[in-house]
Image (spheres, rainbow, N blue to C red):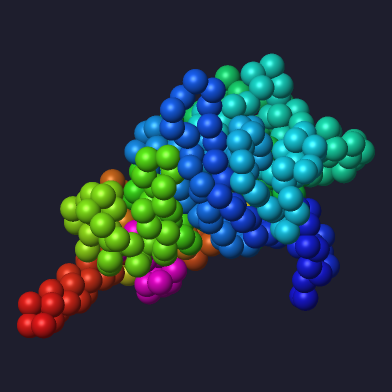
Amino acid sequence: MADRTVTSAEGATSIDGAVSGVEIELEKVTKRYPGTKDPAVNEFSMVVPAGKIVIFVGPSGCGKTTTMRMINRLIEPTSGRITIGGEDALKLNADTLRRKIGYAIQQAGLFPHFTVEQNIAVVPGLLGWDKKRVEARVEEMMDLVGLDPKEFHGRYPRQLSGGQQQRVGVARALAADPPVLLMDEPFGAVDPITRGNLQDELLRLQTELKKTIVFVTHDFDEAVKLGDKIAVLGNQSSILQYDSPDAILANPANDTVAGFVGAGASLKQLTLLRVRDVELKTDVPTAKEDESPAAVREQLVKRGKHFVLVLDSRNRPSRWVHTRELGTAATMATAGRPLGDLVSLQSTLQDALEAMLAEGGGVPVTGPRGEYAGVIELDTVMSTIQKIREEHADDHQEEDQS
């Protein structure tokens, strides 16, 4: 479908009503705090492309969060100019501006005495949406971030895991369909596996929504995984390098940037490659939860297979079952063992490798809405690693000869 472009902070609205991202431009933006000699942020200039994820990465205290918060004026700039979709952000009412910009932070920042539904509905309510529209949007957002509305609708934040809270935080940030999303270390307080899953979820959402996202982190690996572009920042938010992840990995601008890249740059290439970039195994036996265990067992025996992957009513992988477990199983929905780690087409090969090491074998891969897409196997990832190493060895040989 063709898009109708609106040159404003409202974003570009397509025929189906979805709002995509807009360009953000910061021109010589400075922040000085009273009583300090040097500015916290000094003449920061950058163009954030529409519909892309731009990562601010740098050491603690360098000014990256301050810079990001000036975009929605949670911190007021001392001087400079900020435009969002061509509109001067500093001339808008600050509350009006913030309602047009999604904001997600570490530990979600949910209102503890609001239910999941009430938390997600906050900004649409402030914007005066009618009750039916708000209810429909809440359900849509919960489904989008992978939370069953029937199960989580009335829960309170204290009744959710850390990862579930972060999903609600992202749903709340997106509820009013803003063109811009600011994310301040949103996944920093959860365990590594949950963090990887949330990163995958963000990438999945972005393929559908095409928002303009500014994301702050101190984790360079996270920056490489998520960013279309990375801004490596130094003191006072000075831009040490602003480029694509592969360009920064290949050619760090200086020693400071090289320090962020760290050792094992070649293995970091696994973070640039996605599961969608490699071949998946698609001949793994599958069965639906409502099928007869005896019939499934008969088919496995005919094919000489020992395992079957069970899919739910929405075609999402749920369990592995061995043939010996089918003889006594009452239903496919309860047979075998629930899946541990899953990866999506958006996951990196590094994520896939870690999941396979945890699971001890191939791992099911899911598509845009959690549907089964195939299985990724260890041999596939290992052959890709070998290819990367050979390419880097060739590169080093060419450098030595030149």
Magenta range is 269-283
Residue drawn where x is 39% and y is 32% of the image: 61
At 72% from the left and 43% from the top, the residue drawn is 90
**Residue 202, position in %: x, y?**
54, 50
Measured as percent of width and height from the top left, residue 119 is found at 71, 29
Specify the quadrant of the image occupied by residue 153: top right
Residue furthest to the top? 113
Residue 255 lies in the magenta stretch: no
| Picture mark count | 0
Does residue 208 appear to the left or right of 268 in the view shown?
right
User: Magenta stretch containing residue 280, yes or no?
Assistant: yes
Q: Is residue 400 above or below residue 334?
A: below
Q: Position of residue 263 (x, y in %)?
A: 18, 53
Asked if residue 292 can be seen in this view, the reply is: no
What residue appears at the point 54 percent right and 23 percent down from the top-left corner?
34
In this rendering, the answer to whether 251 lies above or below 177 is below
Q: Which quadrant would residue 127 be assigned to in this image? A: top right
225 left or right of 379 in image: right
x 77%, y 43%: residue: 91
Near-viewer residue (242 or 35) = 35
Q: Is residue 74 above or below residue 276?
A: above
Q: Quadrant of the C terminus?
A: bottom left
Q: Toward which corner of the image does residue 74 lie, by quadrant? A: top right
Residue found at the far right of this picture: 130
Q: Is residue 153 left or right of residue 226?
A: right
Please state the horizontal and vertical placement of residue 237, each as a whole percent of the image: 44, 43
Which of the two residues, 198 or 256, is positioned nearer the viewer here? 256
Residues 391 and 163: in front is 391
Name the outermost residue toward the front. 37
Quarter of the picture containing the N terminus is bottom right
Q: Is residue 63 visible?
A: yes
